[in-house]
Each structure stands twice: as C-alpha cells, then as structure tokens.
Amino acid sequence: MNLKMEPLALDGLRFETTQYAAMRSLTLLARLAKSVGPALAAVKSSDLSTDFGVIAGALAQLEPAEAASLTCELLAGTVAVLSDGARVSLLDQRAIDRIFTGRLMTLFRVLAHAIKVNYADFGLGSPSAPSE
C-alpha cells in the first residue's frame, strides 16, 4: 500500500501528514461527521488563521474529551520536523503539547491540513490518484 504524504510549512516548522488507509480514514470520518459535521465543510473554504468562527463552530459541538481524542487521532499520521531536523511524531497528547503549546492557531491549521490530506476526494483538498 502506497499512501501519499503532503508537507506543510507553518510557524517555522515543517509538518508531514501521511494519508490514512481506507478503513482507518472511514472510521475517523464517521467520528468527525458525528462530532463536527457542518463545521467540517467550512474547513474547505476557510483560512483558519483568520476565521475563528469556523473553529468556534466546530468546538461548540464537542465535549472537551472528544476534542482531545479527535485531535490525537487526526494528527497520528503527522510528523513535525523541527528546525534542527529532529522529527516528532504527533501520536499522543504529550507530543502535541510539545509542538503546539503557545501555537494553538498553528494546531488548528495543521488539523485542517490533516483533514484535507485524508479527505481530498470529498472536495476538502487536492485529489490524489490511486496507487497500486
């Protein structure tokens, strides 16, 4: 299985998000739709660096524990590459805290990027050709 990886440069860091396999992506999409449904579509056309309304709309529908859980699941396929070249896999809350404390807007933009990488065929990002 050859999954695509898309980079993103933000706030002096580089993020590399690898697309999830089909079943993991489907399961996560079901959780996202149930939790933040309408706000998810707004991610498509929003610049999260200036559109706090989209973020507030998504968060208003979530219990705090679900917000933390979804964040961890969405970012589990993402690696932060630090300025010294060190790589931090965003697999848990500790790693996410390490990278995003004091950078919440960057966190939201990386979450939006992860959604776009995984759901491009829903119009949330650039479509990718299937790999064999």
Image (tube, rainbow, N blue to C red):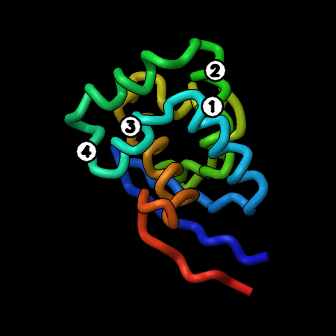
- Answer whether labels 4 and 3 touch (C-beta < 8 Å): no
List x then y, in percent, for residue 111. Answer: 48, 41
Residue pointed to by mark 3: 106
Q: Name the foreground residue: 50 vs 122.
A: 122
- The kind of residue tagged 4 is Asp
- Return the disc, 4 or 1, that comes first in the chain's sequence: 4
**In the picture shown, does residue 88 fall above or below 122?**
above
Residue pointed to by mark 4: 47
Q: CA distance from mark 4 to mark 1?
A: 20 Å
Q: Is residue 54 left or right of residue 108?
A: left
- Quadrant of residue 74 in the image? top right
Label 2: few (<14), some (14–19) or many (≥20) C-alpha neighbours in 10 Å: some
Given this view, does label 1 or label 3 mark the residue nearer the observer? Answer: 1
- Return the disc, 3 or 2, that comes first in the chain's sequence: 2
**In the picture shown, does residue 107 fall above or below 78?**
above
- Answer whether labels 3 and 2 touch (C-beta < 8 Å): no
Residue pointed to by mark 1: 70
SS at mark 2 in the image: helix
User: Residue 66 has which mark?
Assistant: 2
- Answer whether labels 2 and 1 touch (C-beta < 8 Å): yes
- Return the disc, 4 or 3, that comes first in the chain's sequence: 4
Q: Is residue 84 something that shows in the picture?
A: no
Q: Is residue 113 left or right of residue 132?
A: left
